[in-house]
Image: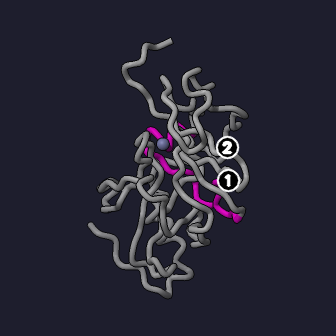
Amino acid sequence: MRLPPIPSFWLPCCLLLAAACGCTEKPVPSTPDPVPAASSPAPTAASAETPDKQATTMRDYNPLTPSEQQVILQKGTERAFTGEYTDNDADGTYICRQCNAPLYESKDKFHSGCGWPSFEDEIAGAIERHTDSTFGMERVEIVCANCKGHLGHVFAGEHLTAKNTRHCVNSVSMRFVPKGEKLPPKIVVDKNAKKQ
Ligand SMILES: [Zn+2]
């Protein structure tokens, strides 16, 4: 079934939004796993000089903790109001935790009150949309266009911003790179590469 339209006077309806965000899914532990200081494997010699924002070919994506795997690979949902970026207002870029692809800019982030980081727009070409019919709802799942890792869902028609769109994204699916810091190269996995 389709979700009923959410009226513009929805302010107390966090519960409704929470349902829309998928909090009925199997929750993952709220205690974040330690984030590896350098989760990006060293690039190959051939790509060591790859400029920022360009791709580097690797045998594998960044290693993921069990909590990250539950969300990114198993399409889980972190508990509302527990993600590290829900209230992050700093300037910068949100990249894919699994493959480093830039996904969202901080200028497109807004406070929706739903308990997850919310964006009204994505970086062009960074996101793929798929129909998600689980849990008796028809939602639009969003995944990283590069590695297909699960990000969350996108909702339209809530009248929360001028663009009338809310990307509801799990913090654990992203990594925040503050403005001024170098973006790591996007990882493109070469499936034909021999395993080490
Ligand atoms: Zn990715």
Answer with the quarter of the image where residue 140 lies.
bottom left
Q: Nearer the viewer, mark 1 or mark 2?
A: 1
Q: Is residue 187 above or below residue 156?
A: above
Q: Are marks 1 and 2 in contact (CB under 8 Å)?
A: yes
What is the magenta range?
68-89
Report the Cα–Cα distance between label 1 and label 2: 8 Å
Please, which residue is most extreme toward the bottom here? 9
Locate residue 80 relative to residue 179 in the image: left or right.
Answer: left
The residue sitting at 29% across, 56% down in the picture is 131
The residue where tag 1 is placed is 84
Check residue 106 for magenta coloring: no
Q: In the rendering, at what x and y percent does residue 72 appear?
A: 48, 42
Q: Residue at x 47, y 86 (%)?
A: 8
Q: Quadrant of the N terminus?
A: bottom left
Q: Residue at position x 57%, y 72% from top?
A: 112
Q: Give the main secondary structure, helix, strand or loop, of the magenta stretch.
A: loop
Mark 1 crowdedness (10 Å alpha carbons): few <14, some 14-19, many ≥20: some
Q: Position of residue 79 (x, y in %)?
A: 58, 54
Rendered image: mark on residue 32 = 2
Q: Helix, strand, or loop for circle 2?
A: loop
